[in-house]
Image (cartoon, rainbow, N blue to C red):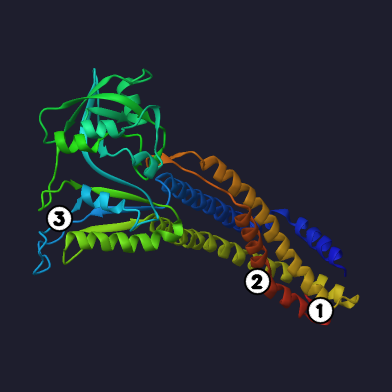
Amino acid sequence: MTFGDTFRTAIAALTVNKLRSGLTLLGVVIGVGAVIALMAIGEGATRSVTSRISDLGSNLLFIQEEQVGASRLPGSRQAAVSGLTLQDAHAMEDRRRFPYVDGVAPQSFYRARVSAASESVDTTVYGVTPDYPWVRNFYADRGKFIDESEMSRRTLSAVLGSKVARDLFGEADPIGQSVRVAVKGVDPSLAFRVIGVMEEKGSFGSTDRGDAIFIPLSTMQAKISADRSALGLTNVMQISVSVSDRAELGRAREEVGQLLRERHRSSEDDFSILSQEELLKTMDDIKRGLMVFMGTIAGIALLVGGIGIMNIMLVSVTERTREVGIRKALGARRGDILMQFLAEAVMVTLVGGLIGVGLGVLGAAFADGKPLMGGNLVTVVTTRSIIITVGVSAAIGIFFGIYPAMRAASLEPVDALRHE
């Protein structure tokens, strides 16, 4: 028998009992559909988070203050320094020591209630420097951002996040309007003049980047809160460092960490440094774990479908024993019988796989954009996932169909013809 004859015979055999064939491929349809949909969700989530991490800025180091014990190196002539300071940030701008540093953005932040006219919102007020937009890839869409003039004069100027601007002013233009900022524990509230509105950036995790208000760091330190180190230097809560080349992130982390240890003279680090590369690596690790989990669930469904195929094929071999005997009596070889039944198993899984791919794609399209955990679900169906899934379904047909096919091929013609 030719290859074409084998598959035509397989199709004819499967169409004889359509209900049984349909029930046989149902398990494969469910398994493949689940694989496609789950992989689409995993891929979409990974791309969405990766995009959000990239939106934070290019090649960044995030330096956070850490609470440590009071111990200091003995015999030091320099007084103890606790936490990150504005002077630490300025030291990182030394291009002779750090030629790969493009920008440094220190900041502090507090929860606050911001009000305008009859509207008020709870948000986060950030004290930042003029380099913040460049370092964090986050710019003013209307008006302007804080500049050196506002910093030096410690003005009561504010730039609103897009969400805060909508909540307070609706569709009206907030530029030039006044907002009152009341930070918890600070009395009285302060009136700021709005000089700009930030661009839409969406959310990162559960944090909406538009749910914020930005003021000069110098104003925050002078008017709201100015935590001081043991040397009387002004503390900041975070420093973002932009590095010119991603390949320099590892070097930058080591050398910036060394600078801070020299300046702080502490027996243990009172800071932590996280790189954008680590965030992306963490996401890759989460993606791999998620895909293994999803693959396990879908694999169980495919396994059940494969077992169902083997059982049905064994029943088919029993029912068609006389047919096998007649074919062998007419000259069919052992390999012909083996290929015939194996082709039937592969045909079932391929048809089930293609139907499952269609249902999985439809399911992913239906789920795309649906609200989930404060955001919208993103699904991405890739060609790679379709090829892998269809290939796996065909492999399952071969694996679970080979035993029934071998059993049919091993029948002796005389015994097969005597079978009732």
Mark 3 and mark 2: span between their CA atoms?
Answer: 65 Å
What residue is drawn where x is 34% and y is 31%? 145
Q: Which image quadrant is residue 362 in? A: top right
Asked if the residue under mark 1 is in contact with the one under mark 3, i.e. CB atoms within 8 Å, the reply is no
Residue type marked 3: Ser
What residue is drawn where x is 86% and y is 77%? 328
Density class for disc 3 (Cα within 10 Å; few <14, some 14-19, many ≥20) is: many
SS state under label 1? helix
What residue is drawn where x is 41% and y is 32%? 199
Mark positioned earlier in the residue sequence (2 or 1):
1
Residue type marked 2: Phe
What residue is drawn where x is 23% and y is 38%? 217
Q: Label 2, on which residue? A: 399
Instruction: Please identify the quadrant where the C terminus is shown.
Output: bottom right
Q: Label 3, on which residue? A: 82
Q: Position of residue 34 (x, y in %)?
A: 55, 54
